[in-house]
Amino acid sequence: MVHTRVTIGSLVLKNPVLVASGTFGYGDECADLVDVNRLGGVITKSLSLKPREGNPPVRIVETTGGMLNSIGLANIGVEKFIVAKLPYLQTLQTCVIVNIAGSTIDEYCMVLSRLDEQDGIHGYEINVSCPNVKEGGLSFGTNCDMVAEITRRLRLLTKKTLIVKLTPNVTHVSEFARAAAGAGADAVSLINTLVGMAVDLKRRAPVLSTTTGGLSGPAIKPVALAKVYEVARAVTIPVIGIGGIVSPEDAIEFLLVGASAVEVGTANFVDPAAGVKIAEGIERYCEENNIGAVTDLIGSLNVAQTTSVIDSWL
């Protein structure tokens, strides 16, 4: 029997597979398509204090090996979430993590404080890395001092697991991971999307209404692996790997480079059951290779005879 549980802060996940924010709605949208309780956990769509309409269309574009999105953190706001979405999430037999976004540090704090009054929420993922909004988001995530300040302020407001979601759109993401860890984060998750662009040749204009958006999907996996490898060597808190995971093999690669868990994102648009299938595939891999626990995979990459440019950054 393979032990599939992993620990992130105070959370004990039944398996290391979560669904990424923004790719699984608030969980209830996929309830008829997949047994959500077979996931290690659900991370909700980002929540802000007030409802947000997001960016105008066009805001999703398919690309080679991935997709661009410029949703702009469209969401129903924290109060409607508590009334309309949280009751379903409270029935789940798996971990529920709410992703929080904001335009100011005070907004992050108000959203978390309101949520922390509710039952059925086990942790928070703090989005400081969205490239699709004009204020907040990426502007916070590319400033180490801001990442530390947001984390510090939120840490004072909750005892629940606090995960900071980092952007890859910086020179050395490990510096931001250290800032979050030093300010009290229980874990970091990465990578969020890479800044990308698509062009309409007929109109000679950008396809997205915002010109650029966030690139996700298999195309970004090599970048994501390198960033997770970098961060896992820089901090002692757990790292959650994100980026182009569509198969059990992809997820296992992230575990080997140091991730304690993974988030499945773009793959959910193709198959809402992708996360469950990936979790089952990880367990099957362990069985076939006589590995007793998923935790034995974490950070077990053999790099003794190799060197990387990353070594010079740490």
Image (tube, rainbow, N blue to C red):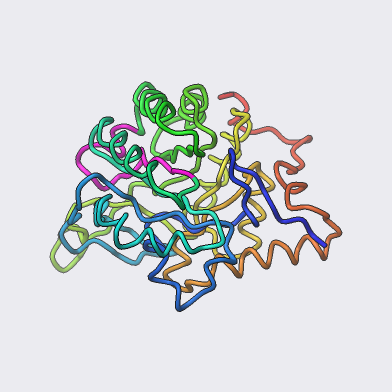
Q: Position of residue 136 (x, y in %)?
A: 26, 36
Front residue of 264 and 126: 126
* Residue name at image x 62 percent, y 44 percent: 259
| Magenta residue span | 123-140
Looking at the image, is 57 positioned above or below residue 103?
A: below
Magenta run includes residue 228 = no
Front residue of 128 and 184: 184
Looking at the image, is 276 positioned above or below residue 18?
A: below
Q: Position of residue 167 (x, y in %)?
A: 41, 39
Q: Position of residue 182 (x, y in %)?
A: 51, 22
* Residue name at image x 31 percent, y 32 percent: 140
Looking at the image, is 81 positioned above or below residue 108?
A: below
* Residue name at image x 54 percent, y 72 percent: 35
Q: Position of residue 97 (x, y in %)?
A: 46, 50
Which quadrant does the N terminus fall into?
A: bottom right
Is 62 on the left-hand or right-hand side of 284?
left
Is 301 on the left-hand or right-hand side of 244?
right
Front residue of 146 and 119: 119
Looking at the image, is 89 positioned above or below residue 146?
A: below
Residue that sits furthest to the right in the current view: 290
* Residue name at image x 40 percent, y 61 percent: 23
